[in-house]
Image: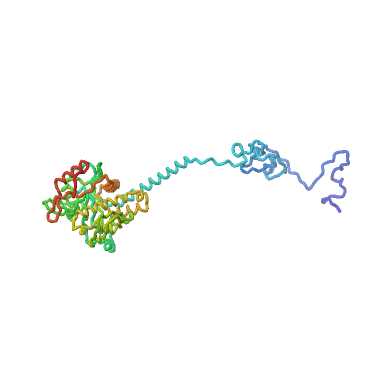
Amino acid sequence: MNDWPDRRTGDRSEHYGRGSASPQPEGARAMPHIQRRPAQPRTPQRPQVPPQSQGYDDRYQDGGYGNSPDPGYDSGYNTGQVYGSGSGGSDGRGGGGRRGGGDGGYVQGRPAPDWRRRIKLGALTLVVALLAVSISTYFWADSKLKREVDLSKVIERPESGDGTNYLIVGSDSREGMSAEEKKRLRTGSAEGKRTDSMMILHDGSNGPTLISLPRDSNVEIPSFKGSESGKMFQGTGRQVKLNAAYAEDGPELLVRTVEFNTGLHIDHYVEIGFGGFAKIVDAIGGVELDIPKAFKDKKSGADFKAGKQTLNGEQSLAFVRTRYAFAGSDLDRTKNQQKFLAALASQTATPSTIINPFKLYPTMGAGLDTLIVDKDMSLWALGNMFFAMKGVTGGEGTSMNMPISGSVGGNLVWDKAKVKQLVEQLNNDEKVTVKGN
């Protein structure tokens, strides 16, 4: 059997050297089945170091010499150097086995977090967010204000004094109320609206002063300009109840009548109806009130026991409207109104309401939807009024009724001497020493 490749014979001397027994070196063997690749000029190449994080031998790249002419060719040899071993070390890993520094064979450790920078960025983000929310809330609330009262139509006005004077009016307006709400709140269904309560709030440097103006006060209707027609109406010395001025020509005539009979300049006008009043109370979860004496009133729906209790919107409206439980006295009712409004402001202007959007926005929405103010009223001025109202019960404020000297024809007559002294103290922003009824 012939064990050699094709075209070979048993004579091994035919094409292969002379054998190891020859004294001359053996010649090159002819191996026709192997073809040599043509020689190509070799261009010196710069060794390419694999990425440090891979940590494998360079023999898999260029045969261990770094300049293999044939990519992918493995010569099977190795220089013994492993990339990423560093520049030597006692443990064979280079760099004394330490990671980092000059150790190119290991992933660099992450730097320590810069907490100071993170805190600054977090604080800046929070400030920007709060600013954006505040600005959007401001424009949202401002858009809800009903600036319908034009005080520029009021004629022959007294000069302004120190501090700010607000005329706060509670009307029996049923605007926006459903038939069910009118029945539940016992408001009746009368058309139009009338003033149910009137107060002057003075906000000055000596603390706020809240003065109730009984709606049965006997006042003179002066000359005035019609709020709608612009027509001039001359005064005739007519004596009427104060709430008749509102019924005759609205807020502008009411302001004109208050200024004429007191001599006090009114800076801003604020009015709220029955429905809005009840909604505000319900939005804040009710108002806690200490009622010194139990009373009932079928007309208003009031039925209260003595002691501390939380009133909802329906109960609150009944409380401030009740007059027949007090022998028909409007003075007792105005005292209850002052007490309630101060408690409402005090319990609304709290951190639990202001910083809680789930209470703040419903409360603002309920109030702003029904508030009617003068055209020059800003949210800032409205906020000042609200916090001044809160200050009435904070020990720094005063609440009182307009001083009364008697009555005529069932109307309450103001004490002119005391009213004059009171107005002087308010105009000069002095501490009020006048006592009301």
> As displayed, is residue 107 above or below residue 330?
above
Q: Residue at x 11, y 51 (%)?
A: 237
- The image quarter containing residue 319 is bottom left
The answer to whether residue 249 shows anywhere in this view is: no
Quarter containing the N terminus: bottom right
Q: In the image, is 37 to the left or to the right of 96? A: right
- Residue at the left extreme? 236
Report how many numbered discs are placed on residues in the image.
Answer: 0
Given residues 97 and 394, the one toward you in this image is 394
Residue 27, horizontal then vertical, whole percent? 83, 41
Q: In the image, is 251 to the left or to the right of 32? A: left
- The image quarter containing residue 429 is top left
> As displayed, is residue 19 above or below residue 213?
above
Residue 190, horizontal then vertical, whole percent? 22, 61
Q: Residue at x 59, y 38 (%)?
A: 100
Please say which color scheme the image uses: rainbow
Q: In the image, is 417 to the left or to the right of 316? A: left
> As displayed, is residue 74 above or below residue 215?
above
Residue 398, horizontal then vertical, whole percent? 24, 46
The answer to whether residue 317 shows anywhere in this view is: yes
Residue 310, horizontal then vertical, whole percent? 31, 56
